Image (spheres, helix red, strand yellow):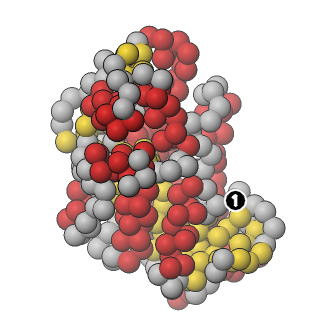
C-alpha cells in the first residue's frame, strides 16, 4: 500500500516510517525540504498551507494518509503569538491535505486519513472518572486546539474517507524530547509537580507505532482513538517509579504556584491530567508490548 506521511521527519514520524517500510509499504514523506529518495522512502516537497502543488498528485492512487504535522507544544513560551502559531501549524496542514483529497478523483482517493491529535482534548479531569473516547472536549487551551485540529481532519469523512484521530498521550521513547524533559527533574531528585495527584497518561513509542499501524489496517477503527498505555497512574507515582529505575529518590515536590509563575499557561502540560484509557484499540484486540509502566521505563532508562 502507498502511504503518504505529513510530518514524517519528526520523532514519531521517523519511527512510523521505518515500521511501514519494514511492513513492505511504499512510503512517501511530505517535507518542506527538497524532494529526494533514500532508505526505501521518497521525500516530496509540499506547501503545508495550500492544497495546490505537484505534491497533491501523490494522493491519487494512494491507500492512506498519515498527518503528523504540527509545531512542538513543548518548545517556546506560550505567548499569544506562540499559541496562535501552535494552532495554525496543525489546522493549516490538515486543511491543505483534506482540500487536496477533495481535488482528487473520487475513485483515486485514499481510503483512510489517520490524523494525529492530543489526549489533552479532554482538558483537566481531576476526578477518578475513567475517560474513554466518547467523553466531551475540555476547556483548556490544548483542548480547544485539539477540537479545531480534529474538526479540520473530520471534513475528510464527507469525501468518503475513513478518518481516525489518534489522541496521543506523552510519548516515552529514547530521544523523545518530552520524555527527556520529564525524566530530567527525577535525575535531579525532584519529584511530583504540584500535589502529584493529577492523572498522567503516557505511551511507549513502540506501542504508538502499533496503534497507527492498526488504525491504517483495521477498517473498524474511526473517529477518536485514545493512544495511551492502559497503566494510567497519578503523576507522583510516575515520578516515584522513574526514581526507582534511575535509583534517585524523587521526593522533592515542585509547588504548583511556582510552575504557574514560571510557565504561565504552559504549566497545564504538567499540572493537568485525565484518566484516559485506550478503549477502542483494546476492543479491537491490540496487545500492548509495553502496557505496564515498570517494563516501559526499564526498557527505556536501562536499555533492557
Q: How many marks?
A: 1
Would you call the spot at circle 1 few (<14 residues within 10 Å), some (14-19), or many (20 or more)?
A: many
Instruction: Look at 59% across and 73% down and name the residue there.
Output: 4
Classify residue 79 as left or right of residue 250: right
Camera-nearest residue between 51 and 165:
165
Q: Give percent across and percent down for residue 201.
A: 33, 42
The quadrant of the picture occupied by the C terminus is bottom left
Q: Give percent across and percent down for residue 178.
A: 51, 40
Instruction: Look at 25% across and 37% down and name the residue there.
Output: 233
What is the quadrant of residue 67 in the picture?
A: bottom right
Q: Is 4 rendered above or below residue 170?
A: below
Residue 5 seen in the figure: yes
Q: Is 132 rendered above or below residue 258?
A: below
Q: Is 204 rendered above or below residue 265?
A: below
Instruction: Look at 30% across and 62% down and name the residue there.
Output: 289
Classify residue 240 as left or right of residue 283: right
Label 1 residue SS = loop
Classify residue 13 as left or right of residue 167: right
Give the labeled residue for mark 1: 48
Camera-nearest residue between 206 and 266:
206
Instruction: Look at 43% across and 28% down and name the residue there.
Output: 186
What is the quadrant of residue 72 in the picture?
A: top right
Q: Give percent across and percent down for residue 173.
A: 47, 51
Q: Is 261 rendered above or below residue 7?
A: above
Amino acid at each position: 500500500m502507498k502511504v503518504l506521511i505529513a510530518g514524517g521527519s519528526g520523532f514519531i514520524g521517523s519511527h512510523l516510517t521505518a515500521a511501514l517500510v519494514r511492513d513492505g509499504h511504499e512510503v512517501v514523506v511530505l517535507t518542506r525540504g527538497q524532494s529526494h529518495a533514500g532508505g526505501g522512502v521518497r521525500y516530496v516537497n509540499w506547501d503545508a498551507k495550500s492544497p495546490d502543488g505537484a505534491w497533491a498528485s501523490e494522493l491519487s492512487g494512494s491507500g492512506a494518509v498519515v498527518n503528523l504535522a504540527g509545531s512542538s507544544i513543548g518548545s517556546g513560551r506560550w505567548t499569544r503569538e506562540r499559541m496562535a502559531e501552535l494552532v495554525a501549524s496543525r489546522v493549516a496542514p490538515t486543511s491543505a491535505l483534506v482540500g487536496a483529497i477533495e481535488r482528487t478523483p473520487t475513485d483515486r482517493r485514499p481510503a483512510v486519513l489517520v490524523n494525529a491529535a492530543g489526549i489533552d482534548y479532554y482538558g483537566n479531569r481531576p476526578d477518578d472518572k475513567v475517560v474513554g473516547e466518547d467523553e466531551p472536549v475540555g476547556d483548556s487551551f490544548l483542548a480547544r486546539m485539539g477540537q479545531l485540529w480534529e474538526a479540520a481532519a473530520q471534513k475528510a469523512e464527507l469525501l468518503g474517507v475513513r478518518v481516525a484521530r489518534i489522541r496521543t498521550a506523552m510519548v516515552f521513547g529514547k530521544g523523545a524530547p518530552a520524555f527527556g524533559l520529564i525524566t530530567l527533574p527525577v535525575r535531579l531528585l525532584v519529584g511530583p509537580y504540584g500535589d502529584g495527584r493529577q492523572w498522567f497518561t503516557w505511551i511507549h513509542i513502540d506501542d504508538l507505532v502499533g496503534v497507527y499501524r492498526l488504525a491504517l489496517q483495521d477498517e473498524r477503527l474511526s473517529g477518536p482513538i485514545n493512544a495511551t498505555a492502559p497503566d494510567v497512574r497519578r503523576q507522583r507515582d510516575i515520578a516515584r517509579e522513574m526514581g526507582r529505575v534511575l535509583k534517585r529518590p524523587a521526593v522533592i515536590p515542585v509547588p504548583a504556584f511556582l510552575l504557574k509563575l514560571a510557565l504561565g499557561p504552559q504549566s497545564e502540560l504538567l499540572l493537568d491530567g485525565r484518566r484516559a484509557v485506550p478503549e477502542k484499540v483494546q476492543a479491537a484486540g491490540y496487545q500492548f508490548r509495553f502496557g505496564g509502566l515498570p517494563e516501559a521505563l526499564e526498557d527505556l532508562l536501562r536499555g533492557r
